[in-house]
Amino acid sequence: MEPSYVQQTLGNGLRVVIVPRRSAGLVYVSLVMRNGRIDETRETWSYTHMGEHLLAKYTSKPFPTFEGVKGRLGLLGVENNAYTDTYDTGYWLVGPSDHLPFLLRLLSGVYFDYQFTDHWQRQRNIVMEELKSRASNLWTPLEEQVNRVLYPRHRLGVTWREELHTIGQATQRDVVRHLQSRLD
């Protein structure tokens, strides 16, 4: 049997789907954007991944510092994470259900009032280390060869070394411009 759900569109255009579940007083809130690796070009390889790291700081005009957001999430007992894949990028938070209004404000702030902190270089280094870790994966060369054949001259056929080069050359302004073209 399909679970019941409520769907509505907020005044700011954000579509909200609420699926009630019996739980131990927890709420799971997720924001998924149609912005994935498939939306990148030769000039923007890994910008989506970089943007995911920047937006996962959950900083916005109402919540300007990552340290403040991280501290508050910790005090409230809220877990969080983010991901990017071929088709979309998502952010999720799970915590006590009485904090639902705060969690919704936090996520919608990322989408509508995003404000990047000064963590650019640190986050770029983390993304670059993640890309370098693919070198030690036994299946990476085979996967890259298959993808080059399946997706010639397309983002999905890019090697980790090509992504590493693109991110190494990227500026915060480049990534923000790419994100704005996808988010706005």
Image (cartoon, helix red, strand yellow):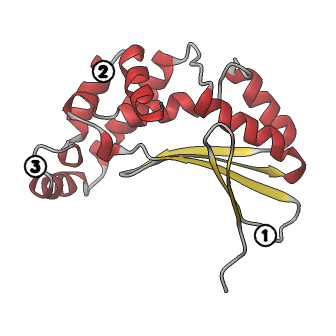
The kind of secondary structure element at disc 1 is loop
Residue 132 place in picture, x, y as percent: 32, 36
Q: Position of residue 91 (x, y in %)?
A: 59, 44
Q: Residues within 10 Å of mark 1 (few under 14, many from 20)?
A: few
Q: Which residue is mark 2?
A: 168
Kindly indicate whether the residue at mark 2 contacts the one at mark 3 (C-beta within 8 angstroms).
Answer: no
Mark 2: amino acid: Gly
Residue type at tag 1: Arg
Q: Earlier in the sequence, mark 1 or mark 2?
A: 1
Q: Is residue 144 above or below residue 1?
A: above
Q: Which residue is depicted at the point 72% across and 34% down?
A: 106
Query: Which of the 4 quarters of the picture holds residue 116?
Result: top right
Residue 121, how many percent across, how many down?
A: 46, 16
**Residue depicted at 73% across the width and 30% down the height:** 70
Residue at figure coordinates x 43%, y 21% from the top left: 176
Query: What's the CA distance linking mark 3 and mark 2?
Result: 23 Å
In this rendering, the answer to whether 162 lies above or below 78 is above
Give the left or right position of residue 100, taking residue 171 as reference. right
Q: Answer yes or no: do the residues labelled 1 and 3 have beta carbons within 8 Å?
A: no
- Where 133 falls versus 150 (above or below)? above
| Viewer-closest of 76 and 134 | 76
Q: Which residue matches tag 3?
A: 152
Marking on residue 21:
1
Helix, strand or loop at mark 2: helix
**Residue type at the position of mark 3:** Pro
On-image quarter of the N terminus: bottom right
Dividing the picture into quadrants, the one containing residue 127 is top left
For the point 42% across and 16% down, which residue is it?
172
Q: Earlier in the sequence, mark 3 or mark 2?
A: 3
Q: Dot 3: what SS?
A: loop
Mark 3 vs mark 2: give the one in front: 3
